[in-house]
Amino acid sequence: MKTKNQILWITQTAMLLGLTIATQYYVTSALSFNTYLSQIVVGSLVNLFLIISVVTCGFFSGLSISVLAPFISFFVGRMPHIWMIPFVALGNTAIVFVFWLICRKKILGSSFLINWAVASVLGPLLKFGVLWLGVTQIFVKLILINDGSLQPQQIGRMSEIISFNFSFLQLITAFSGCILAYTIYPALKKAVIAKPLNSEN
């Protein structure tokens, strides 16, 4: 039974990772005519998959997607700079950790609605804080500006776009992801979720 659950965990995590990557690649391409709309849609869906992964499969599933997704995004050309990867991974991990602690571990009690409501406030706020500090304050102001491989015009343009994408826009996409996850999780739980592994509790 343990082996069966492990295989199921790997399969579910791989499926959610695949959906995350496909969303970043194909939806971004389809909405390339409107960068703002693309960021909203893609960001919301990525947060949806992160939340679904941790509440259905456990912390290490969410952590795996949090870390692997930005790496793959960079290697397929959807992330503009390699040193953004650790900050994006930390931001993803922040919202995953909040949902694991509150909704998975139920530290606030057994009420699904209360747990989800609190996690849906704290998770996006923590992710926003991590990304704002890591990307706009550390990466842009300390790393990107000193990148000798880029021209000053490139640095200026990238700084403007990245600072916009990783500021308050992250709150919108994180909150949207929480709402989307809340609407589909109950049905998903009944339909496809098997008993979780003890190590994933």
Image (cartoon, rainbow, N blue to C red):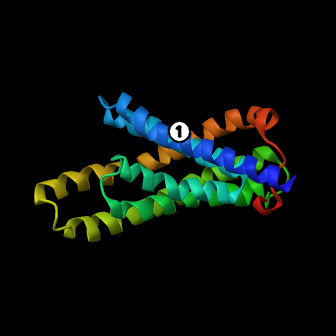
Foreground of the two, 186 or 192: 192
**Residue with the most extreme front position:** 3
* Number of residues whose C-alpha sits closer than 10 Å to that of mark 1, classed few (under 14), some (14–19) or many (20 or more): many
Residue at 59%, 42% in the rendered image: 48
Q: Going 12% across and 55% down the picture, which residue do you hit?
A: 153
> In the picture provided, is 135 more to the left or to the right than 91?
left
- Name the residue furthest right: 1
Horizontal relation, residue 22 to residue 38: left or right = right
Instruction: Answer yes or no: is residue 154 visible.
Output: yes
Check the image and report above or below for 196 versus 141: above
According to the picture, the residue beneath numbered tag 1 turns out to be: 45
Q: Residue at x 61, y 36 (%)?
A: 180
User: Mark 1: which amino acid?
Assistant: Leu
Indicate whether 22 appears above or below 59: above
Q: Is residue 187 rendered to the left or right of residue 99?
A: right
Return the x and y of residue 108 as percentages of the image width and height.
Answer: 79, 58
Count numbered badges in the picture.
1
- SS category of the residue bearing label 1: helix
- Position above or below: 68 against 169: below
Near-viewer residue (64 or 162): 64
Residue 134 placement: quadrant: bottom left
Where in the figure is residue 183, as x and y percent of width and height? 68, 33
The C terminus lies in quadrant: bottom right
